[in-house]
Image (cartoon, rainbow, N blue to C red):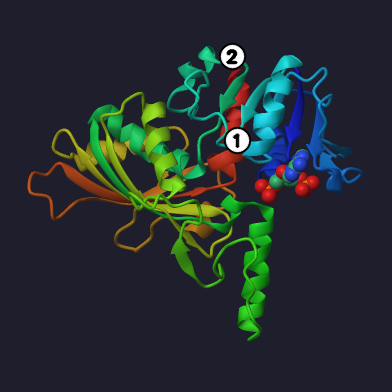
Amino acid sequence: MSKNIAIVGATGAVGQELIRVLEKRKFPVGSLRLLASARSAGKTMKFAGKDLPVEELKEDSFSGIDIALFSAGGSISKKFAPIAVKAGAIVVDNSSAFRMDPGTPLVVPEINPEDIKKHKGIIANPNCSTIILLMVVAPIHRINPVKRIVVSTYQAASGAGAVAMEELRTQAGDYLAGRDVKPTVFPHPIAFNVFSHNSEMDFENGYNQEEIKMVKESHKILHTDDIAISPTCIRIGTFRAHAESIHLQLRDPVDLEKVRAALAAFPGVRVVDDRKKNYFPMPLEASGEDDVLVGRIRHDIGSSDGREMDMFCCGDQILKGAALNAVQIAELV
Ligand code: A2P
């Protein structure tokens, strides 16, 4: 049965991709309402060969809507998601506003689809770095429980939205032309640079909010607090795919063949792991791909008991890290 869909934040980096993912996956769309700020009202965007108008998001925007896909930031979600639910819509929210609310399911469809059933109107889409991490950790956790994760991220500009991608493009041109580089979206130059993630830092423990999200959200999605997780989140000057270097400590000794087989069999994961050709996951090759790419799968040579392993993955932050995951959730409601 076809559904009437609204996209809140349709003009943003994730919003634009939501439109494409609905098209590509042939989602049964009855009607599509594109919502954004007053700045975008009157623009048109293409869906299924037709030009659709962008409307200003208002309190009465949700009448007749079955599913509302939100990607316009936490404050918009906090205000408008309950309004959409009241109007009868089911909300799939890409912001962090409701993720840790005990009554709101937080879902990666390949990992915990059963949680969707518990929703009370809102289903939260996890943080992009968390989704990409768990897509390659969950298959291993199922065959040999994970006890500890140490992860370092290499995060693309897209996580901070379309304006951040534009900042990277502009700065790259300025830098190469020898002009001054002026950061506005990020606190530091993003082109040709690497810096600690720009989310709020807890001065007591030295972790930033992105890192704390990865810890808390992973526990919620995997239904356990028993995995010790220490992330280091880093921004790099790539456009739209996040990379992550992952160290795992497992309960039992690591059987690499079984790990590889579990990863290869997991939907949405592709093993790219050719040691002879030095060919492993790269952000450029993960960009535009639905699958999370994983490689560098190896024993930790420093491990004394054979229970530790390492790997490296890349996933498109806008697709599996956001829009694709949200549409997959919508397909299940
Ligand atoms: P607009 O393009 O009109 O500013 P991104 O994550 O790429 O930065 O995109 C943010 C999205 O959220 C855009 O679609 C943006 O619309 C939308 N947005 C921002 N502020 C508002 C608002 N006050 N009301 C509705 N949509 C908003």
Q: Amino acid at mark 2?
A: Lys
Q: Is residue 21 visible?
A: no
Foreground of the two, 239 or 126: 126
Where is residue 1 shown, x and y percent of the image? 73, 14
69 up-or-down from 17: above or below: above
Q: On the rendered structure, is 3 left or right of 43? A: left
Query: Crowdedness of circle 2 by 10 Å Cα count: few (<14), some, many (20+)?
Result: few
Residue reaching furthest left? 304
Between 60 and 258, the residue placed more toward the observer is 60
Residue nearest the observer in this picture, 196 or 239: 196
Residue ID for mark 1: 94
Residue at the spot 66% in from the left edge and 84% down from the top edge? 179
- Marks 1 and 2, how far apart at CA: 16 Å
Q: Quick one: SS at disc 1?
A: loop
Q: Position of residue 199 (x, y in %)?
A: 50, 52
Residue 18, image x, y percentages: 68, 38
Residue at position x 25%, y 43% from top? 248
